[in-house]
Amino acid sequence: MTTTTFILFIIIFLLPSIYQRSRYALQPDHFLKISLRKKVKLQIHHAHWGLIYILISSMWLIFADKNIYIILLAALGWGLLFDEIIPHLKMPSNDRLLELDVYKKSTKPTIILIGIVALIFFILFLAFR
């Protein structure tokens, strides 16, 4: 990795936190109305988008040539994810039974998701070997 690529990686890694924290400081009401959450009825956070970007960039790095764009996509994904790690760890949870119930009810969708990702990896493996 060149010095320029590394510097760009760090900048892109930092941008999500700078953007999200600045926007929250300036427009906290913006974060109260998230239309996508209402439409899909899921608690989507920017960390989830980060995981998607990390998955895409990981697949690309495994099966295709490395380039600056995919490295920066990984940096963006990591930045989005890391911005929410501490808030999630500090989120109070007074209902362990609810947590376990949600975990139990998410077993089938989780297995389906993991199966789809594994299938995509397998298809890419066959396509690029």
Image (cartoon, grey):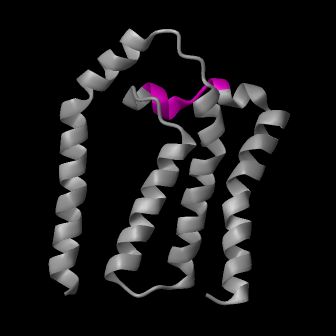
> Which x, y percent locates residue 124?
22, 74
Identify which residue, 65 or 26, lies in the foreground.
Answer: 65
- Give the left or right position of residue 72, taking residue 104 as reference: right
Which quadrant of the rendered structure holds the N terminus?
bottom right
**Vertical position of residue 31 compared to residue 120: above or below:** above
Asked which quadrant contains residue 62, the reply is bottom left
Asked which quadrant contains residue 103, the reply is top left
> Which x, y percent locates residue 119?
17, 61
User: Residue placed at 57% from the left, 82% from the top?
Assistant: 68
Q: Residue furthest right?
A: 26
Numbered range of the magenta stretch = 32-38
Identify which residue, 17 or 95, lies in the foreground.
Answer: 95
> Which x, y percent locates residue 19?
75, 50
- Give the left or right position of residue 76, taking residue 38 as reference: right
> Which x, y percent locates residue 59?
35, 70
**Vertical position of residue 106 compared to residue 18: above or below:** above
- Residue 33 in magenta stretch: yes
**Vertical position of residue 110 compared to residue 99: above or below:** below
User: Residue placed at 65% from the left, 37% from the top?
Assistant: 86
- Give the left or right position of residue 95, taking residue 110 as reference: right
- Residue 73 in magenta stretch: no
User: Residue placed at 64% from the left, 33% from the top?
Assistant: 87
